[in-house]
Structure formats: structure tokens, C-alpha cells
Image (spheres, coloured by chain):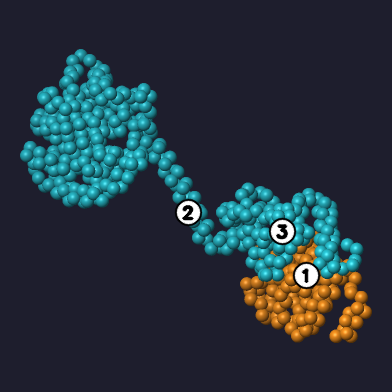
Amino acid sequence: MANLEAKHLFAYNRFPDNELKKLLVVAYFPFGVILLLLRSVLALFLVIFGQVLPDTQVTQNFLYNLACICFGITVSVDNLKQKENVSVYIGNYLSILDHLAVSKALGFILPLNKTPLQSLPGLGITNLGSINNADSFKKNLEVVLKNKNTSVYLCPEETPTNGRALLKFNSKYFEFFEKVQPVCITVKRPLDIAISTIGSTYINDVLYFMYAPFTNYTIKLLPSLEKKSISTDGFSEIVRENIASELKITASPLSASDLLEWSKRYLAEERRRAQERTNQLSNSFSSASNPELVRMAAQVKEVLPHVPVGTIYNDLNVTRSIDTTITNILEGRIRFVPETPRPSSPTPSTSQQPSTSGCTSSSTPSRQGACTSSTQFNTGASTFGKSANERTKSIKERKEQLIAAARRRYIEKHNLDIPV
Amino acid sequence: MAGSALRRLMAEYKQLTLNPPEGIIAGPTNEENFFEWEALITGPEGTCFEGGVFPAKLTFPPDYPLSPPKMQFTCDIFHPNIYSDGRVCISILHAPGDDPMGYESSAERWSPVQSVEKILLSVVSMLAEPNDESGANVDAAKMWREDRSEFNKIAETLVRRTLGIPLRPYRAVMANRDQS
């Protein structure tokens, strides 16, 4: 647990790897689709109402409930009684809709982190601006807290994780808070459908909220903490340790930007790999669909039937010449595994088999006969001589042997009374 | 041009040396001239040319394999598709468009993907199954059609000659004829 790296804090697949669970996920598919459709209708209403309804307590309540139904969010709170009347709740960041669950549990609170529901004025979510612009942020925050009489909810981790560790908090927020109440969130979904995967978009995650049977948030309130005379950084660290120990997860030294950086790199690498794959695919596809190359490969294949077509393609792709490819193959510049190796010349067993190579296109019954004739008619050499002399000598010898063998056979066959 | 022809011929020579079709040997007569080859072709079994080993000469053009080689038997041979001087008349030795007899389909024509090996195999097929519509040797074609036994007799003579086996004593043949 001690050394959780960035890569451990992401989910990579939406669906579980486990075989049995996979089966369940498949079985669930039709229900998921129906749910998704029904919830889409609700979402449509949510969007319309969110746009037109005034931003009042009643409508907010209504809209939040609607949103929870729409996204299948159920909430259970362990200790609601511990809720204290603070203006800031600090929680761990698990999903883009965390604040919805917290709002449902604790009454309307204003999320400080980005959320897909920001664009619906009816929900009363105001953008306070970037924390980096501290002055305007502070002003906005004061206005909101005073006028609306609501609390705010903050995930100072600033990016959702899979919940295995708690990222470094952005301590800048803590400058503005004197007293906060930490909130521990755990989230569970049946079928182990991941809340968010690496590189997934809002839309993507939201769609899975709507597809999953439901998403259950368990919220646990911790006793509130006061800053008093502690430094901002120290205070943020204390809050973080409180939450981490309650959730029994590590307080990771990584920050949101580390995670973002890592995911960016991971995704870039993935894209590069995918690109390579499609390149390869399209390469092999284009060569497979290039009639000229197919024709050429077939011709090379006829000449060298023991060479796999794939090997021939690849070389033709480079050479674009039947000639060069044949030469390359014959001179051993290309490695390949022979498909049906030609019988090597001096083995007697080959005599009974129909020849694999010689009798191809032009084979006629008579040719077949010649092929199955005695091994004496095997005229190949075991090596191709390096020098002209060697080769000439070899071919001369083989010619003599061939004639001698033919003569012997002829005499035997016709029972001639002639010395062999 | 000649460079690529040489490369190709070398490759084919290697291929034919290491993996020749049975009963066939082919290679340059003298490697100082790679464009002149000598080949030995064994007459296919079950035909009148069975057992014979027929020598032939292959002459390659400088633009081989764009143009086909020429092939000529250097022994006596009597066959409907072989001129009396031994030149072989077979479709694979003709480039498309060059059709002296006007009956060949272009599918069996010469093209750079053909090879010496294929030519030799085609010649083996030709020995087994003469095409008597081609009139390279009209006498042979006529005899093949009309007097097969005489044709076979001549073929046997030729086979024996290639093997250096003396012909049957002439007298014995005559005696047989007289008896019949």
C-alpha cells in the first residue's frame, strides 16, 4: 500500500476482468440500455427544468432529487447526526457527481469543483472562478456564502481517483476556511462498472451513471476541524490525514497535476500504439487489397511454393519487383518458415510422394508419373557451389549420373542383355 | 538490363540445382556465358519417350526475363511440336502477341514470372502429350495421328540413342516383319 504510483489510481477498464462478472455485465446489457433510455428522458427534463426554473430552495430540492434519480444515485449516510453547521465540507474526490450525493445527504451545498451540472442555472451552482485568482475567488465565495446561505463542498484533491489513495490537497483553498467538516465518501456500483476510466470524458462518465443499475454513495461525516493558529498547509494536511485514516487509504505524495501528467502520457502512448496498429492494419490491408501486389505475390508463390504468402507480400511491399523478391528469397536474405518443405533430394522416402513443388500448374498425369519415378531421377545437388568451377563440375557429374541411371533403368526394365 | 538478367538466371540456376523437378537438370554450359544453358530432360514415364534423357540447349536473350529464351534439342528427336532441327515450339516460349501458329491462349504464354523450370516442365508435358494441331513437324504430327505404333517405334529408337544403348539388331526387326 505504501508505494502507490499514479498508474494505480486510475481505472483502465469500465468493466471488470473477472469472467463471472463479465458474464453478468453481458446479461445486464439489455436492462442497462432500457435504463439508459428511460433516464435519458428524465435527463432531458432535468436540462429543460434546470434552464427555465428559478433558482429557489424548492426548485433546487426538486432538481437535485430529479438529478439523483436520473443518474441513479443512492446515498446512505452513516452518521447524519454528526453534521455540524459549518460552511465548508471537505471530501475525497471519487466522481464528478460526488456533490450531488453530498447535497442529497446534507441538503443543498455548493460544489466548488467542476461539475457537469454547472451549466444548469436552476441548480444554483455558481462558478467562483479559479482558485489561482485568489482575490476574486474570495470575493465570490463571500458573496455566495452570505447571500445564498448555503455551505460549499470542496474536493481539494481536484481530480477524481479510483479511491485507492488520497492525493495531495490544494492547500490554497484552506486559506479561506476557518472551520471545515471532513466528509468521507465511498462509492459502489453493482457489477463493478467503473465510475470513471482513464481519459474518459464527462459525457462518458455520465452515460455510465445512467446505464448502471445504480451508484451507491456512502457518506461518513467526521468531526469538524478548526484552523486556529495552524498554517494553511498544515491545516490542509491535517484534514487530509483525517480523511485518509478514516478511509484506511494512503495519503499519497502525488498531486492532481502529477496524475493528469501521467494520464496524459499514458493516453498519448496508447494513441501512438493504436496509430501503429491501424498503420499496420492498413498496411496489410492495402497490400492485401492492392491487386497488383496480390498478383505479383501469387506469381512469386508459384515459383517458390514453400514460401509463406505473408513473407512474399512483405518483401514485395518493399521491392515492388517479382524478380528482386525471388532473388532475395533464393539468396536467403529473407527469413521465413517454409510451409510445406520440398523433399530434400537424396531421401528415398520422397519417391513415393507426389512432388509438392514440381507438379504444380503444369502437372499432367504423365508429369505425375515422372514425379513418382525412382529416386535415381533426383537430380538435385545438396549445395550450390560457391565458384563457377564447383558448379560446373557438380552439374557435369549430375548429368552423367542421370544418364547412367536412366540407362540402367532402361536395361533392367527391358531385360536387355547388355552390361549396365 | 543484362545485370538483372544475370541475377535472375543465377537465382534460377541455384533453385534448379538445389530443388530440381525430378529427372531434370539444367544449368549454364559454361559459366563464362550465362546466357547459354544446357538441359537434360527425362522422358516421362508411361509415354513413348519413357526413360530417354534428352539434351537441349537454352539460349537466353539479354533482356531475359522480359523476353523468353529459345530452346532447341541437341539430339535427334521426332515429335509433332519440335522442328526437325530440334527447336521447340511451345506456347510458354512465345511472348503474348507473338503467335506463329495462332492457336495458343495467352495464359500459357511467356511472361517474366515464368521460369526455366516451368519451361522444362512444359516440355515434359509436351513430350507426353503432343499437340498435333501444331505443325512444327508435320510428318511427326501425321504419324502421331495415323500410325501411332510406328511413331512409338521411332521414339524408342531415339530413347535408346540418348542412352547409348544399341538399337535392336536390324535383322531381328526385319525378321519379325517378315513373319507377320
Q: Quadrant of the N terminus of chain A?
A: top left
Q: Secondary structure at mark 3?
A: helix
Q: Which residue is depicted at the point 78% across and 70% down?
A: B50
Front tag of 1 and 2: 1
- Both on one chain, marks 3 and 2? yes
Residue pointed to by mark 1: B50
Q: Colour of chain A?
A: cyan
Q: Amino acid at mark 3?
A: Ser
Mark 3 and mark 2 lie on one chain; the one further toward the N terminus is 2
Instruction: Quickly name the residue at label 2.
Output: A282
- Image marks 1 and 2: residues in contact by CB distance under 8 Å: no
> Which chain is depicted orange?
B
Residue A117 shows in this picture: no
Circle 2 residues within 10 Å: few <14, some 14–19, many ≥20: few
**Disc 1 from disc 2: Cα separation:** 53 Å
Task: Using residue B19 as the reference point, say whether residue A283 is left or right of it.
Answer: left
User: Badge 2 sits on which subunit?
Assistant: A
Badge 1 sits on which subunit? B
